[in-house]
Amino acid sequence: MDIMLKEAILHILDRESGSPVFSQVPLDLTKEYIREYLTKKIQKLTNPQTKTGTLTQDALFTQLVQACQENFTEASEGLTKRWYDSYAQSEDAPSCDVFVVRYEVDVTPFVAFLKVNYHEGYTHFVEGSDSGVANQLIINRALLANKTQKADEGLMVNLETLFYGLVEKRYTFSGEKRLYFSEEVIETEPQLSLEDNVKVITKVAAKIGQKFEATQHDLVADVKESIYDSIEDSGEVDVNLVAEKVFKDNITAQLSFKEEVAEKGFVDRAPMVEEVRELTEKKYGKQKLRLSNGIELIVPLDVYRDPNLIEFINNPDGTISVTIKNVEDVINRL
């Protein structure tokens, strides 16, 4: 993703001080460390936890996002105020900084809203006194995460189509944890993220599998393998392929599975951007096994599929033996 930054601004939201500090001057994008920090944060908004949707044209939040093209500084403040009106009602939402960024991807205009929470850290402080120079250790409670870490919450909006990607967190409001960003701020309901879709698939498959007495470790392995194959072949998760792979010739189980995942809000055949596809293929290209005796195995899919390399044997006493075959060498790493 080739990002061309156009304008960016930083607003401070220290909840202990009681009111936001809005900047009246944009950040200096001629400084490389600022460009690199913002670019990395925008890139990391695209991940398996990202929810997607389309903003409503006449919503106040949408109008503020669009206004960033004409009057960036003023619109960024209005956008942040609109968000903060909801965020400030939470009992446990932490202090943070907000970056509003206008940028382009292949000449397509975008606006990003990045929320980065404060972290506590230690640093030195040089203090002069009558006794001489004193090097002190102090706590800084307003440190930001480094450039390699994701923003704690964030939104990126395509200004031509109003299609958005959203990463959000649950915070407590009146004693109840909820997703305030999608429910109150942007005023549209996003689709489930890829990660949430996979959780739905896995949970429903386990439920249906238990009903039809499927072996648990085989079922989980088949779910992961079907997700990997679907993404590798078509760049999306196909519920039909998952159903056929997991429940094979059991048509009744396949139908029950597809009906229930649809009820849970599963988004079938939702296309993925290349960055998410690569991360997902890497994650689901391996089977992670934890045995009851404490042994843990990470097995590549092509090895897991090959009975000449690994075999699971159901013993008469109900236990399972795992046999690893044809190993040329064992490397012990600390």
Image: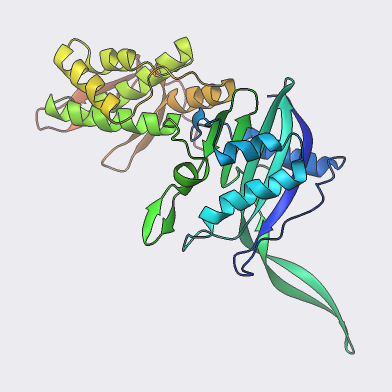
Q: Position of residue 6 (x, y in %)?
A: 79, 34
In this rendering, the answer to whether 72 lies above or below 331 is below
**Residue lying at the far left of the rendered structure:** 316
In this rendering, the answer to whether 128 lies above or below 223 is below
In this rendering, the answer to whether 84 lies above or below 251 is below
Q: Quadrant of residue 320?
A: top left
Q: Residue at x 25, y 20 (%)?
A: 258
Q: Residue at x 47, y 46 (%)?
A: 184
Q: Position of residue 229 (x, y in %)?
A: 41, 14
Q: How is the image coloured?
A: rainbow
Seen from the viewer's position, the closer of residues 13 and 82 is 82
Seen from the viewer's position, the closer of residues 79 and 179 is 79
Using the rendered image of the protein, determine whether residue 6 is visible from the camera's viewpoint: yes
Q: Is residue 189 left or right of residue 76?
A: left
Q: Quadrant of residue 197?
A: top left
Q: What is the quadrant of the N terminus in the image?
A: top right
Q: Residue at x 80, y 47 (%)?
A: 26
Q: Is residue 212 left or right of residue 80?
A: left
**Residue lying at the far front of the rendered structure:** 58
Using the rendered image of the protein, determine whether residue 322 is visible from the camera's viewpoint: no
Q: Position of residue 3 (x, y in %)?
A: 73, 28
Q: Position of residue 167 (x, y in %)?
A: 52, 39
Q: Quadrant of residue 249?
A: top left
Seen from the viewer's position, the closer of residues 303 and 86 is 86
Q: Is residue 132 left or right of residue 285?
A: right
Q: Residue at x 58, y 20 (%)?
A: 274
